[in-house]
Image (cartoon, helix red, strand yellow):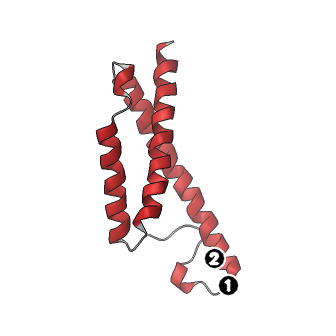
Amino acid sequence: MPLPDAIDPQACETMIEVRAGVDALDRELVALLAIRFGYMRAAARIKDARTAVRDEARKQSVIAAAVAEGEARGLPGDVIADIWERLVEGSIAYEFAEWDRIRD
């Protein structure tokens, strides 16, 4: 997927091009995270019990799916697992905070 303000990684010939690509990608990743956290706000709104926020089976399923997708794309599974562990735990913490905020 081409990024605005970036060239294909395989076409990079300078560190300026590499860094511009990484910076553009980081902006896109943050935009995607904003959408993901929007889903966490929706979950907090929809769930009727605070105890429903943490779902360990769902957490493990999400991480396993990310690892499988990453590995299918040639990425190191252990790194993807670490990133998704942090992402999912952060999402759960955010959802708890939103659940509490909505109901105060």
Q: Does the rendering let one see residue 5?
A: no
Picture residue at 47% right of the left edge, 55% below the top:
82
**Residue 7 image offset from top left, x and y in percent:** 56, 77
Label 1: element kind: loop
Query: Where 86 falls versus 15 (above or below)?
Result: above
Q: Residues within 10 Å of mark 1 (few under 14, many from 20)?
A: few
Residue at the top extreme of this rendering: 104
> Quadrant where the N terminus lies?
bottom left
Towards the viewer: 79 or 41:
79
* Quarter-of-image position of residue 13: bottom right
Q: Residues within 10 Å of mark 2 (few under 14, many from 20)?
A: some
Label 2: element kind: helix
Which residue does the numbered mark 2 point to in the structure image? 18
Which residue does the numbered mark 1 point to in the structure image? 14
**Residue 29 image offset from top left, x and y in percent:** 53, 56
Picture residue at 47% right of the left edge, 27% below the top:
96
Amino acid at the residue labelled 1: Thr
Task: Give me the C-alpha separation between circle 1 and circle 2.
Answer: 6 Å
* Mark number, residue 50: none
Q: Does the rendering let one see residue 67?
A: yes
**Residue 14 image offset from top left, x and y in percent:** 68, 84
**Residue 66 image offset from top left, x and y in percent:** 36, 57
The reply to whether discs 1 and 2 touch (Cβ–Cβ < 8 Å) is yes
Towards the viewer: 71 or 45:
71
Amino acid at the residue labelled 2: Val
Picture residue at 65% right of the left edge, 71% below the top:
20
Query: Where 80 falls versus 43 (above or below)?
Result: below
* Quarter-of-image position of residue 74: bottom left
